[in-house]
Image (cartoon, grey):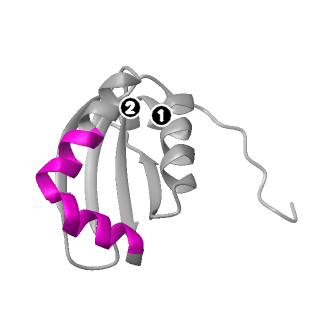
Amino acid sequence: MTKFLITAAYNEDGVKGLLKVGGTNRKEAIAKMIADIGGKLEAFYFAFGDYDVYAIAELPDTTSAAALALTINASGMVNLSTTLLLTPEEIDKAAKMTVNYRSPGN
């Protein structure tokens, strides 16, 4: 499975919905939604700042992540962003790969 950092910013209607149902309810709803597509919610936090929610989830693949983002963003109540996370071992493997690159203008 692939890990993703999920950040979300509520708009005015999203905040009203959160005030109505509470934080624990939202976390449970998100965990169930992720489980329903074959994933697992690993961490979920509300925060101050640019984003209202930070979560880490394991999802089956990038297509599942895209489906999740499309569905949530289509609600119009949340602006969600997903970031693919890489393990140190994956970076080690990438660092050992040879890539033929020609810089612009060369």
Image-quadrant location for residue 23? bottom left
Question: Which quarter shows the N terminus?
Answer: top left
Rate crowding at label 1 as few (under 14), some (14 to 19) or many (20 or more) other CA atoms within 10 Å. few
User: Which residue is at 86% across, 60% downward?
Assistant: 106
In the rendered image, residue 64, in percent from the top left (x then y), is placed at: 50, 30
Q: Helix, strand or loop at disc 1?
A: helix
Image-quadrant location for residue 57? top left
User: Which residue is at 82% across, 63% downward?
Assistant: 104
Rate crowding at label 2 as few (under 14), some (14 to 19) or many (20 or more) other CA atoms within 10 Å. few
On screen, residue 19 versus residue 99, left or right, reads left
Q: In the image shown, does 25 or 47 lie closer to the viewer?
A: 25
Q: Is residue 89 visible?
A: no
In the rendered image, residue 41, in percent from the top left (x then y), is placed at: 24, 35
Q: Are marks 2 and 1 in contact (CB under 8 Å)?
A: yes
Type of amino acid at the residue the image marks with label 2: Glu
Give the main secondary structure, helix, strand or loop, of the magenta stretch.
Answer: helix
On screen, residue 100 versus residue 78, left or right, reads right
In the rendered image, residue 99, in percent from the top left (x then y), is placed at: 65, 37
Which region of the structure is painted magenta?
A: 13-30
Type of amino acid at the residue the image marks with label 1: Ala
Q: Which residue is mark 2?
A: 90
Q: Which residue is mark 1?
A: 94
